[in-house]
Image (cartoon, grey):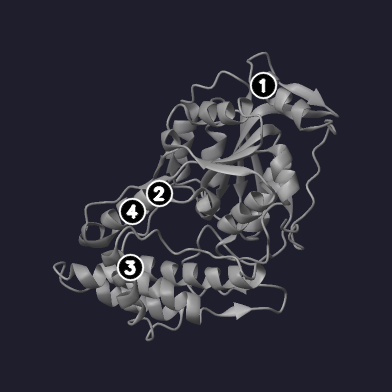
Amino acid sequence: MCARPPCAGRLVHPGDLAGSHQRRRGILDRARPAGAVAVNDKLFVAASVIVPSYRGERRLPELLERLARQDFEGTWEVVVALDGESDGSRDILDEYRDRLPLRVVASTERRGVCATLNDAYEAAAGAVLIRCDDDLSPAPNMVRRHVEHHATTEAPVGVIGATRDVFADTPYARAYGIPANRRHLAGVYRRRDDMIWMHWAAHNSVTRETWDRAGGFDTRFSYGEDSELGFRIHESGVRIIIDPELEIEHRGPAPDAEHRIPRAFLSGASRKAFAKAHPGVRHEDAVWGSLRAWLWAAGVNAFTFALRSAAGCRRYGRAVDGLPCRNTDLAARSPHRAGCRGCRQGRISCRTGISVQLRLAGEPRHGRTAGGRGRRAVQ
């Protein structure tokens, strides 16, 4: 069994419920619309939707509108975790307080997504903890569907809803973005059961008990922290499933090669960090459905040697964006090249643990930094 990460805080479940059967029964009870349950002066509800956000002023309104239309009849809440306050996100949230059971967890400065999410999960009152990033558009049945999975399953489970990218009609989207996302989704649904943890990302759910046992996000990671947590949940004996009915629209994919290629490099570098944290564990790149796909991957590997940093990948991506749109082969291969090169060349710092060094100046991924401290307020 995988050990609790040394940098993650210990999150204790208030109320000290005795045994997993009692906790499952508690989920069923709290899923009824009879009202919240108070335990040790803390209000418990059936579900908490946890939303990490960094400078989300433009992304949050769409998500909050979708959450306001949920058809779940039980008690639930929305916990929005602001990673620093440097835009108008707080004002946007205040506009929805009369329409949503909303709480805000905020830090005065950027601390990174791991610390931000750990704070939000700790503050959440739900028996079922649902992560939903601020650039997603959930269907009306999202909360209900997640709660039903945990309320009707004897053994603990982790539930994933895959993300379906939504693109503007651009040459990049036609050449790479849309076809790549289609291939990705097909691979997600073909993934072997013992490797589903790799898709633990922006939309998933666990019970409070499972979260406490896993120990939260490992703050040593700056990128790839999602699937690393998924691996530890899997290693703890929890079965992870993907529910096609929970597939969700993702409004924030990379809009062009300038942004996508550096992200692919960092994703590759995070696999190198994962290998150091969990020696001997295989982290698959993709599900190859044919010999042609395997040959594609082999060919891509041969072109990776010129890419040595995320900043270099960004410059390369800018050049790709400037090419005629008919050059679809280069646009399609480039992100995969960057990912392969990141896995080989990505810089890893071991001074305070394993941390992928983000090199995208001015392009943080939801404020991912490796652990700064800041005052936190829950409202």
Marks 2/3: CA distance? Answer: 16 Å
- The amino acid at mark 3 is Trp
- Secondary structure found at label 1: helix
Q: What residue type is labelled 2?
A: Arg
Image position of 118 with respect to 341: above or below: above
Name the N-terminal-most of marks 4 and 3.
Answer: 4
**Which badge, 1 or 4, comes first in the chain's sequence?**
1
Q: Residue at x 66, y 69 (%)?
A: 277
Q: Disc 4 designates what residue?
A: 181
Which of the two labelled residues, at mark 2 and mark 4, occupies the earlier sequence position? 4
Q: Residue furthest top?
A: 34
State the residue position of label 1.
28
Front: mark 2 or 1: 2
Q: Which residue is drawn at 37% across and 59% down?
A: 254
- x 31%, y 72%: residue: 334
| Quadrant hosting residue 170 | bottom left
Dot 1 or dot 3: first in sequence order is: 1
Percent coordinates x, y for residue 113 in the rendering: 60, 57
Q: Which of 48 and 237 is in front in this view?
A: 237
> For this view, does 78 lie left or right of residue 299?
right
Classify residue 225 as left or right of residue 255: right
Label 3 secondary element? helix
Q: How far apart are marks 2 and 4 (CA)?
A: 14 Å
Whether pointer 1 and pointer 4 mark residues with C-beta atoms closer than 8 Å, the reply is no
Q: Nearer the viewer, mark 1 or mark 3?
A: 3
Answer yes or no: do the residues labelled 2 and 3 have beta carbons within 8 Å?
A: no
Q: Which mark is residue 190?
A: 2
Residue 195 visible in the snapshot: yes
